[in-house]
Image: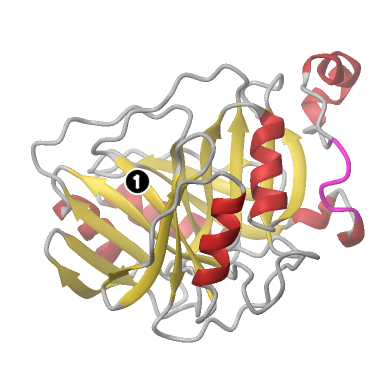
């Protein structure tokens, strides 16, 4: 049990203009903006984090917003939809709210016995608000316009579109400890019982579909959660023994990570709970400062001059 994945940790996607991305996720969807930092590999680009009050694992959606990013192309080898858990009775509210903000949204639809509302963010990233079959006990972040009876709880599931799901399924079951939950046509759902939320992964078989291109409106990687560094390194050994190439441990300031590309082509990350988002900001001030990794602090003045101003 101790070596099993604890559901999703975070999801990272690519966006276009930073202000537009910030406005949609903070003001329209009502998520908390928990961290404003920069891309480790391109510090002239922001790295935004959105989640619940404290940035709990399983609620964290992050973005690299490039002002002039090319548009991604959907296809195989991608995480193709992010599903958020919402309370029963909230889909009418969201349908009306999204439409009022100019988001194209149709009526709720059924999938695997659950009602969901599907739409895209301003960059074309596919999202769904899903009423789970089982009550979601997580406490949401709320705003003046998005109250607790409708607010997003965190991730429900993420869908991976694959030319051949067999190798991905083997990673989920043999390495991560997921089990097959149910299947409907080309969609197969896997679940972990280690957590109450952010516990589901859907594999969507799309044989013959060309590979997608990861750019604006696309998920960059899918991060799975482990409790601490010791568990991280044990999972690293397990991935390596399976024959997959995996990185050494990398310090990402708020968590420690490993990366590998699973057989279907999706970039997977394994990330720790520690040290958390309050390592450089107190709870009340999360998301209110530009936080830089230590190696870039000496370039603060230069970076502040090139990063877009966010209001």
Disc 1, SS: strand
Quarter of the picture containing the N terminus is bottom left
Q: Residue at x 44, y 27 (%)?
A: 215
Give above or below for 296 relative to 79: above
User: Is any part of residue 226 visible from this angle?
Assistant: no
What residue is pinned by disc 1?
A: 80
In this picture, residue 61 sits left or right of residue 296: left
Q: Does the magenta run of residues contain 79?
A: no
Give yes or no for residue 287 being in the magenta stretch: yes
Location of residue 132 (image quadrant): bottom left
Quarter of image, res 94 = bottom right
For this rendering, which residue is in front, 113 or 262? 113
- Tell me if mark 1 has few (under 14), some (14-19) or many (20+) residues whose alpha carbon lies within 10 angstroms of its own: many
Q: Name the quadrant containing residue 158.
A: bottom left
Residue under the point 52% across and 80% down: 89
Magenta region: 285-290
Q: Where is residue 116 shown, x and y percent of the image?
A: 39, 67
Q: Quadrant of the C terminus?
A: top right
Q: Position of residue 264 (x, y in %)?
A: 23, 43
Mark count? 1
> Does 202 sit above or below residue 67?
below
Relative depth, front residue between 78 and 22? 22
Percent x, y of residue 141: 72, 67
């Amino acid at each position: 049990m101790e070596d099993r994945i604890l559901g999703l940790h975070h999801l990272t996607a690519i966006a276009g203009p930073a202000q537009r991305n910030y406005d949609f996720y903070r003001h329209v969807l009502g998520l908390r903006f928990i961290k404003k930092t920069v891309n480790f590999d391109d510090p002239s680009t922001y790295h935004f984090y959105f989640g619940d009050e404290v940035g709990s694992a399983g609620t964290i959606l992050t973005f690299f917003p490039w002002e002039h990013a090319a548009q991604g192309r959907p296809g195989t080898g991608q995480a193709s939809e992010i599903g958020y858990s919402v309370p029963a009775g909230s889909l009418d509210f969201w349908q009306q709210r999204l439409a009022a903000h100019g988001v194209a949204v149709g009526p709720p639809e059924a999938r695997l016995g659950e009602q969901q509302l599907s739409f895209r963010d301003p960059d074309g990233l596919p999202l769904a608000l899903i009423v789970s079959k089982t009550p979601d006990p997580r406490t949401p972040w709320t705003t003046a316009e998005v109250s607790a009876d409708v607010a997003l709880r965190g991730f429900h599931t993420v869908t991976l579109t694959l030319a051949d799901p067999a190798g991905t399924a083997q990673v989920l079951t043999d390495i991560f400890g997921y089990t097959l939950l149910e299947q409907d046509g080309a969609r197969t759902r896997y679940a972990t019982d280690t957590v109450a939320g952010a516990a589901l992964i859907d594999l969507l078989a799309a044989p013959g579909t060309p590979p997608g291109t990861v750019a604006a409106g696309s998920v960059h990687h899918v991060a799975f959660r482990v409790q601490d560094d010791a568990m991280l390194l044990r999972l690293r050994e397990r991935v390596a023994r399976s024959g997959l190439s995996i990185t050494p441990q990398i310090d990402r300031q708020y968590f420690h990570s490993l990366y590998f590309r699973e057989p279907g082509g999706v970039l997977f990350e394994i990330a720790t709970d520690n040290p958390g988002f309050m390592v450089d900001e107190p709870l009340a001030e999360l998301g209110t400062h530009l936080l830089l990794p230590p190696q870039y602090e000496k370039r603060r003045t230069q970076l502040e001059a090139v990063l877009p101003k966010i209001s």
